Image (cartoon, helix red, strand yellow):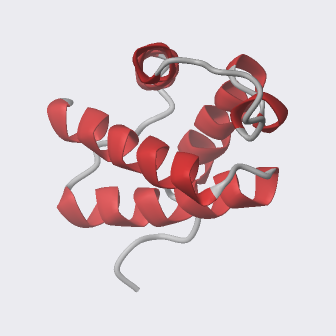
Amino acid sequence: MLFPSGRFEALVEGVTQRISVRFPPVVANDPERTISQERITEILGETFGAALRSGQAPPIGFLGRAQVRSAFRRQLREIGYDEKFVDFAADKFVEHLGRRRS
């Protein structure tokens, strides 16, 4: 096994929980509500930063980021986000993890 089972589970669950509070799927998926891409990026950045500062994240290398991305996408889908948001948020999360020193 390449990674211990559940190694990044707490991180992914914490981040998705925070996103669902700050930017719920009902808002994200509503075409009547227009929230700028800049604001969404800001919410995601603040959420990722808070989760990573809280000590939930073990050191994450390249393969770990791929595993986190997959788990993160799955969780966002389960919560009810549309595919466009899932793709955008997952890309931003991996980008954020990549800037962090492992």
> Looking at the image, which residue sits at the far bottom?
1
Return the x and y of residue 10 as percentages of the image width and height. 62, 44
Q: Quadrant of the N terminus?
A: bottom left
Residue at horizontal 64%, vertical 21%? Answer: 34
Q: Is residue 63 visible?
A: yes
> Looking at the image, which residue sits at the far front?
32
Looking at the rendered structure, the number of numbered marks drawn on it comes to 0
Q: Is residue 8 visible?
A: no
Residue at horizontal 47%, vertical 42%? Answer: 89
**In this rendering, position of residue 100 left or right of residue 85:** left
Return the x and y of residue 66 as percentages of the image width and height. 33, 64
**In this rendering, position of residue 7 left or right of residue 17:** left
Q: Is residue 14 above or below residue 50?
A: below
**In this rendering, position of residue 26 left or right of residue 58:** right
Residue at horizontal 28%, vertical 38%? Answer: 97
**In this rendering, position of residue 2 left or right of residue 21:** left
14 or 77, which is in the foreground? 77
